Image (cartoon, grey):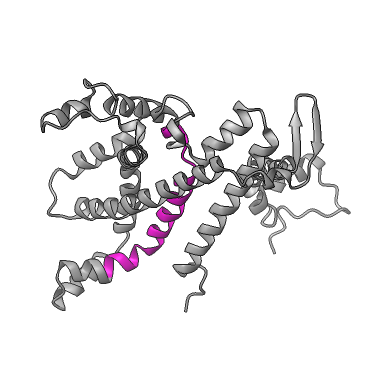
Amino acid sequence: MNTKFAVDASTSIPRSSFWRSLPYSKKLAPYILVSPFIISFLIFFAYPVINTVIMSFQEILPGQVKYVGTENYENLTNRQFYRAMYNSAVYTVLTLLVLIPVPLIFAVLLNSKAMRFTNFFRSTLFIPALTSVVVAGTIFRLIFGELPGSLMNEFLSLFNVAPANFKQSAPLAMFIMVILATWRWIGINIIYFLSGLQNIPHELYESAEIDGANAMDKFLKITLPLLKPVTIYVLTISIYGGFAMFTESYMLFAGNNSPKDIGLTIVGYIYKSGIQKNELGFGSAIGITLLGIVLIINVIQLKFFGLFRKED
């Protein structure tokens, strides 16, 4: 038996040696290694969530805090809340329809041996992800400006189409936000899918070719099933990203006050209520409601895709 780091009260091992041996203990080492994550989780996630839940039942004014029960949650039944939820839900659905299949197709093409200049295309598609969302939002605001000289209106004029005021129409404003999200995040999702594709054994494709499978058969019966874990991960973070979107809309409309709330998101509504109107209790109630909605949606989709099932 190895007693190198054993400690007995009856021995006369110096106390300093005992403390130096603790990090090498087989029982304590795992806890020491995971302690940074646990501490950061408790400080930066658990404590804020618990504090926000408490604040959601309070009316918080400068120098005054009082409990109001469920009044903040009852006040959620208003037009702005429903509009913000509608905008966030539509935005999330549309981005999911784009940011899952399109990056998957690009990843398959970039992973193909027949594809040339793959490193160039990978770098080009990933560069937008390095761009600040503030800069990207400002650029898109100028591109889709209401003046006839804006880039998009200049492009429309080539086809004798009258200048459009993109940020006054709800469908056009949503279209711009989805295009902005696609431009910024498609490279990230391509990287996720590429990592999954490169972990698929090439022997499976060779065996399928011997059995007479064509490219579509290999994609449907090998690539898609083996990319399921990556796809579920991308879907999960995309749902979160969709409902958490705020800065893109804020920069696109140069503020949090879009015409008829066509660009108001649920996070934007939290900002408007909690920060701009100084109603921290009501803003906390919106945040907890958003947390619950996103949690329920992700649990349902994880259950639907079988992630919680035990492997045979």
**Residue 311 place in picture, x, y as percent:** 48, 75
**Residue 61 place in picture, x, y as percent:** 75, 28
**Residue 181 place in picture, x, y as percent:** 35, 40
Residue 242 sits inside the magenta stretch: yes
170 left or right, relative to 214: right
Check the picture and name the quadrant holding the N terminus.
bottom right
Name the residue rendered at 57%, 47% in the picture: 290
76 left or right, relative to 241: right
Specify whether residue 297 is in view: yes
Name the residue rendered at 66%, 48% in the picture: 32
Closer-to-camera residue (235/114): 235
Residue 246 sits inside the magenta stretch: yes
Name the residue rendered at 75%, 24% in the picture: 62
**Residue 234 place in picture, x, y as percent:** 40, 53
Q: In this view, does 11 lie above or below 165?
A: below
Q: In this view, does 161 lie above or below 191?
A: above
Closer-to-camera residue (300/198): 300
Q: What stretch is highlighted in magenta?
A: 222-249
